Amino acid sequence: NDEKVQIVGFGTFELHSRSARQGRDPRTNTPITIPASRVPAFKAGKAFKEATAKK
């Protein structure tokens, strides 16, 4: 996946693909198809993890 943004010392943001899937409308309880989409994901960098770790 070439669509990523890396911020040194903080982490990496990238797009992940999510497949289409079945869901339910909570108001009517009818089945619906949730379309495929791309969602942002974040992976913390080593320096960020160390800075936020409980001591």
Image (cartoon, rainbow, N blue to C red):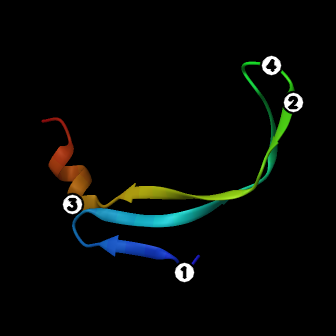
Which residue is disc 2 drawn over? 31
Mark 1 closeness class: few <14, some 14–19, many ≥20 residues within 10 Å? few
Which residue is disc 1 drawn over? 2
Q: Judging from the image, what secondary structure is the residue with disc 4 in?
A: loop
Q: How many marks?
A: 4
Which residue is disc 3 drawn over? 47
Q: Is 52 displayed left or right of 22 in the figure?
A: left
For residue 52, what is the image quadrant?
top left
Measured in 3D between alpha carbons, the distance from the residue under mark 3 to the one under mark 2, in whole angstroms, is 44 Å
Measured in 3D between alpha carbons, the distance from the residue under mark 4 to the one under mark 2, in whole angstroms, is 9 Å
**Residue at the (42%, 64%) spot, across then down:** 13
Which residue is disc 4 drawn over? 28
Q: Is 49 displayed left or right of 20 in the figure?
A: left
Of residue 20 and residue 12, the one placed in the foreground of this image is: 20
Residue 27 lies, in percent from the top left, at: 73, 18
Image vertical order of residue 46 relative to residue 34, above or below = below
Q: Judging from the image, what secondary structure is the residue with disc 1 in?
A: loop
Question: Which numbered disc, 3 or 2, marks the residue that appears first in the sequence?
Answer: 2
Between circles 1 and 3, the one closer to the viewer is 1
Measured in 3D between alpha carbons, the distance from the residue under mark 2 to the one under mark 1, in whole angstroms, is 35 Å
Disc 1 to disc 3: CB gap under 8 Å: no
Residue 26 lies, in percent from the top left, at: 72, 21
Between circles 2 and 1, the one closer to the viewer is 2
Residue furthest toward the right?
Answer: 31
Tell me, for residue 38, which label it has, or none.
none
Q: Is 50 displayed left or right of 27 in the figure?
A: left
